Image (cartoon, rainbow, N blue to C red):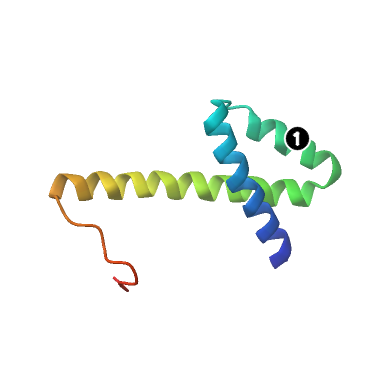
């Protein structure tokens, strides 16, 4: 269900940002528990979005680290590569 994924991803993005601002690693788990009490399906969509965003963030960090070691300029906006 596309709307569920969109809503879960929006909430995950906001939750990850807030958890970082508050330095609260347990915030995500607390939210997941609260969501799961009403809708296990929504909880799984939320946690999937969190895992995806965390994984992509780690991937981006590797890419940026590699870019920095080779002194490559960042790609231009709209560059298909």
Query: What x and y, as percent, mark residue 80?
Result: 32, 74
Q: Residue at x 21, y 50 (%)?
A: 67
Q: Find disc 1 in the rendering and name its residue.
A: 33
In the foreground, 40 or 5:
5
Q: Residue at x 79, y 41 (%)?
A: 36
**Up/down of 72 relative to 51, above or below:** below
Query: What x and y, as percent, mark residue 6?
Result: 66, 60
Query: What x and y, as percent, mark residue 28?
Result: 64, 35
Whether residue 1 sits left or right of residue 16 in the image: it is right
Query: What x and y, as percent, mark residue 13?
Result: 58, 47
Whether residue 81 sits left or right of residue 52 in the image: it is left
Whether residue 72 sits left or right of residue 30 in the image: it is left
Disc tally is 1
Whether residue 63 sits left or right of residue 29 in the image: it is left
The quarter of the rendered structure image containing the C terminus is bottom left
Give the residue at the far right of this rendering: 38
Q: Residue at x 57, y 27 (%)?
A: 22
Q: In terms of secondary structure, where does tag 1 sit? A: helix
Give the residue at the far left of this rendering: 70
The quarter of the rendered structure image containing the N terminus is bottom right
Q: Residues within 10 Å of mark 1 (few under 14, many from 20)?
A: some
């Amino acid at each position: 269900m596309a709307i569920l994924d969109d809503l879960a991803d929006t909430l995950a993005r906001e939750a990850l940002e807030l958890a970082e601002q508050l330095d609260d690693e347990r915030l995500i788990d607390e939210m997941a528990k609260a969501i799961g009490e009403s809708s296990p399906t929504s909880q799984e969509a939320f946690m999937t979005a969190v895992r995806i965003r965390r994984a992509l963030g780690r991937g981006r960090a590797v890419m940026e680290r590699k870019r920095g070691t080779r002194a490559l300029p960042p790609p231009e906006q709209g560059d298909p590569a």
